[in-house]
Image (tube, rainbow, N blue to C red):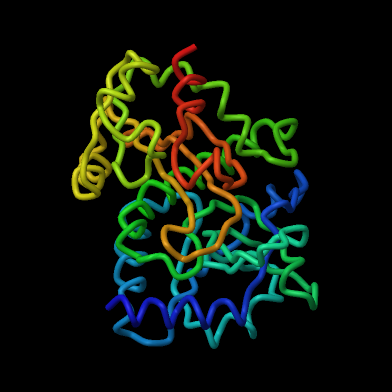
Amino acid sequence: MKKLFFVLIIALATLTSFSPDYVPTADEVNKFYQTKTLVVLDDNPLAEYNFVIKDFMQKEWKLTQFDFIKQSEFEEKRMDKQYSFILLNSVRFDKDKSLARYIFLSLVLGGDDKIVSNMPDLCPVPIAYYGVDEDHYNYKFQTILRFMQQHVELIHKNPKLIKTNALKIYNDSMQSVKTKTLYLIKDELAPECNTEAKIKKIYPYKFKIVSREEVAKAIDERNPDVVFLHKVGPEGTRLIARCYKILIGAADSKFYYFDYHKIEDDAPDGFLAKDFKKLAK
C-alpha cells in the first residue's frame, strides 16, 4: 500500500505545483459555495489514499456537494468554474535553495487560467515532506478536512482575515492549549524536549507522549480534551528546510498554534523548547 501511495505523490507532482502563499479574494471565497467539489484520486483503484480520503469525505464534508475524479480527469475539468477541487499537491518554494518538496492538501477553484499553479487555493495545509511514510499523516486527513471547512467559513464571514500567512491568525488561541491535554509523539519532538522530565521543566501543563494510534483514536472519537501536534519535517529524507508545527484540536479541529522554523543545528526537525515556552506564557 505504501508503494502505491508513493506512486500517487509522483503523479500529482507532475500535475500540480500550487503556491501556498496565494491570497484568495473575498469574491473567490464567495464563488466556492456555488461549486461542486471534486476530490482528485489516484488512478490506481487500490491506492490507500483513495480509501482514506473517500471515507473521510463521506464523514466530514458538509459545505458543498462533492464527487471523486481520477487524476486523468483533473486536467480536463480544472478550467471549469463550476468546480472546486481537493487534492494533494507538490510544493517547492522559489527562494528555498534546498530544493525541498512538500506535500500540501489544497482546496482550489476551477477557472480559465492556463497555468495550473495560478489556480486560487483557498486553504493550503502542509501535510508532509515529499517521500515521508504515509503512516505519519494519513490518519490526520479527517480533522484537516474539518479544519479546511471551518477556515473557509471563517474568511467567508470575515473577509478582513484573508491575508498572507492566514493560518497564523490561529495563534491567538495558543493560550487555550493550557486547558487541554497536549498529545505529543516522541519522534516529532526535538532532542532538547523529547522526554516527560525535559518537557515538565518548561511546560507545566497537561501533556502526554503517545503513539500515532492514540492520536488517531482521539481524532475519531473527537476527544474534547485533546490537542495534538501535527509536525511536518524531513524525517530522514535528508532535506534541510522548513519544519512546520501545528497544534490541532481533536474534537473541534481548530488550529491552536501554527508556526515553522528553518532547520539548523540549533533548531532541529521537531517541536522545540521555545515552542513549549510560547505555549506556557
Relative image position of residue 161 (x, y in whole percent): 70, 32
Q: Nearer the viewer, residue 276 or 142?
A: 276
Q: Where 162 falls versus 86 (above or below)?
A: above
Q: Residue at x 42, y 58 (%)?
A: 235
Identify the image quadrant of the N terminus: bottom left
Q: Quadrant of residue 196?
A: top left
Depth check, front residue: 210 or 255: 210
The residue lying at 48 percent from left, 39 percent from top is 246
For residue 197, side relative to residue 189 (left or right): left
Residue 182: percent from the left, percent from the top? Answer: 32, 28
Left or right position of 221 against 269? left
Q: Nearer the viewer, residue 216 or 43?
A: 216
Observer-nearest of 208 and 225 = 208
Q: How many marks?
A: 0
Taking the view exactly as shown, the residue that stands out farthest to the front is 265
Residue at the image position 32 percent from the left and 24 percent from the top: 198
Percent of width and height locating residue 203: 37, 18
Q: Classify 8 as above or below 67.
A: below
Quadrant in the picture for residue 3: bottom left
